[in-house]
Image (cartoon, grey):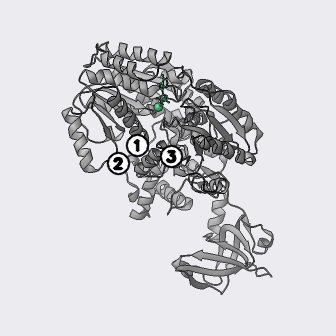
Amino acid sequence: MNLNQVNVTQIKGIGDKTAKCLKKLHIESVNDLLWYVPRSYIRYPEVSTVAEMRDIPDGQPVAVYGTVNRDFAEKKYSNVLISTFTIRDVKGAASIHLKIVFFQQTYVKNIFYPGKNFVFYGKIKRSPYGISIEMPEYYSLEDYNKKLSSLQGVYPLTKGITSKTIGKHVQTVINEFFPVNDAFSAEFIKDNSLMSLSDAFRKIHFPNNMEEAREARNTLVFHEFHDFLKQIEESRISNTESPSDFVINDFSLGDKYRDSIPFELTGSQKETIEEIRADISSGICMRRLIQGDVGSGKTMVAFLAMADLANAGYQCALMAPTEVLATQHYEKFCYDNANYGLHLKPVLLTGSLTAAQKKKVYTGIESGEYNIIIGTHAIFQEKVNFHNLSLVITDEQHRFGVRQREMLSEKGSTPHVLVMSATPIPRTLTLTLYTDLKISVMKDMPAKRLPIKSCVIRPALRKDAFALINSQIKEGHQAYIICPMIEENEDFQLENVMSYHEKIDHYFNGTVKYGILHGRMKPKEKTEIMERFAKKEIDILISTTVIEVGIDVPNATVMIIENAERFGLAGLHQIRGRVGRGDSQSYCVFINGSDNDKENVRLEVLHKSNDGFYIAEEDLRLRGPGDINGVRQSGDMQFVLADIIQDYDILMRVKDVLDQS
Ligand code: ADP
Ligand code: MG
């Protein structure tokens, strides 16, 4: 059975409501659920007696075994149903009374009958009124003891769903659908010290210990790399040297465009453009990757290439991973188009357009009315028929290029393909991942650009970082603050976007305007916030790493990255690249929120260097054993678990296996 095609509603116990919650987490099929792996694990505490609760400090998680007393009561406070009762020790000895509290749970009165025994798991709350546990999980002693033997997954969540329910649904899938199809034979699994795919899913969700979780993860990563490299290999075989219908020899519009822009191209930009021109005049389909560090000016190169193909009467498409980025590219292109007399016909195509708007755009694309099509991947996912698509450029997303190329060829013609990436992948990796692409490396940075000044500090010095922001805002600049989490999460003491304004309010006292941005906002809301930031209506943008991809607001000159210890170096370098894009001096402050001094050593690499390639090499060198909870390094490679830098060794093993077969 292909679990990709089995909807989660087919799982016993999942109704429309839960399915809707899961969809928010991008879980639609049974396969999605299995790949939705915990981001960390906790071990449940051993069972304690009620008497032992006397000395437990406020906030500590406990599992307490007790007997329900005869004092069950329900009250309503401002429409909230509050159910309470106390428990005593099972062995009846003199003990304190521990209060159990539930909110809005109408059914609990049918569960907690006097004299019954339960294990209650939750956090101890101490107040002048006594000791209590609110909204505990509850189990029979037998069930709880079973739980004790394995680690419990903590999943990234959304409102309306808990880690416990996700775990429960995964368990149902395991009971009903396992074993799953395995791409590898038992012999292969043994030879490569992997687990079966079924075991890997079992153990990543319910490991007995961390070692097991790590091994399970390695197996899943192995599968991901295997699929990925195979796909590349297939597309390489089917695509080598196909003749092109779009042969360009007239570069006059590109030249005119280049001579009109208010800056001189860098040496790397010039070289790359020459390489592209050689490709598109050769009669063979171009397949080229531009690898250029953040801020190296890849967009300009893309625009120049599009100008020449469009001038020859052909269509070009530029695809960005997010609406924010697509909109930004579109606006920039429209500006150039109008100001430098290009007379091309650009259009923006994103998921936020209404159905009627989309239809109009589709018609215009099909008729050839538009020749520059800029948008999100929606362009290809939906039914778009091109008039004569000659060039596809994908920005900041490698993997896209590989898959979509196939789809495009199926649509008739074979366009030239240009893939742009800022992920500074070490050379050995590039050769593995891009066997099917020629590579242009853009090493030069636009002149006049001052290197970003970076430093690593402890949270205690945060106010100094705020002072820096303040002085930059006074000079008319703007700032980014990056947090690892969207909202507060009890399991991770990490800064989050939603409550960060408390710090801002406290320090700036209403003198600055801030906005927030995170991955769970609707694309349209994200675009709006970014536009307001670009228009300087917002001084400080508090964001998760969603800003990582390609945003260009040159007036922003300071960035603070909270909990920098949570990120890989290559990722941090990417994020930092959002500043230092204009003529002014820019600053980046990394806040190390861990007590681990080794972290400082690692983060100091960023203080020392602004060179993405050097940083990526150092990252590989300093990389510890695959951290199972690590924040993803290479955002634009869309693997679920795998990370090309962190899991470099596995990638190389998979490559060996494939080379031998
Ligand atoms: P990236 O390579 O990260 O995608 P962008 O294309 O967004 O970089 O370019 C970063 C900024 O540098 C933009 O504001 C762009 O207009 C500007 N820029 C590009 N090329 C040059 C150049 N040769 N000289 C000066 N500024 C440039
Ligand atoms: Mg870019």
| Amino acid at dot 1 | Glu
| Amino acid at dot 3 | Ser
Q: How far apart are marks 3 and 2 (CA)?
A: 39 Å
For the residues bearing labels 2 and 1, Cβ distance under 8 angstroms: yes
The numbered mark at residue 198 is 3
The numbered mark at residue 323 is 1
Q: Position of residue 521 (x, y in %)?
A: 46, 52
Judged from this view, the residue extending furthest toward the left is 367
Nearer-the-camera pick, 356 or 178:
356
Query: Taking 239 as reference, is 586 above or below it?
Result: below
Tell me the residue at 47%/45% (across/down): 530
Q: What element carries label 2?
A: loop
Snapshot quadrant of residue 95: bottom right
Residue 317 placement, left or right of 625: left
Q: For mark 2, what is the residue?
A: 352
Q: Where is residue 586 in the image (x, y as percent from the top left)?
A: 61, 34
Tell me the residue at 41%/59% (across/down): 20
Query: Taking 282 as reference, is 121 above or below it?
Result: below
Sequence-wise, which precedes: disc 2 or disc 1? 1
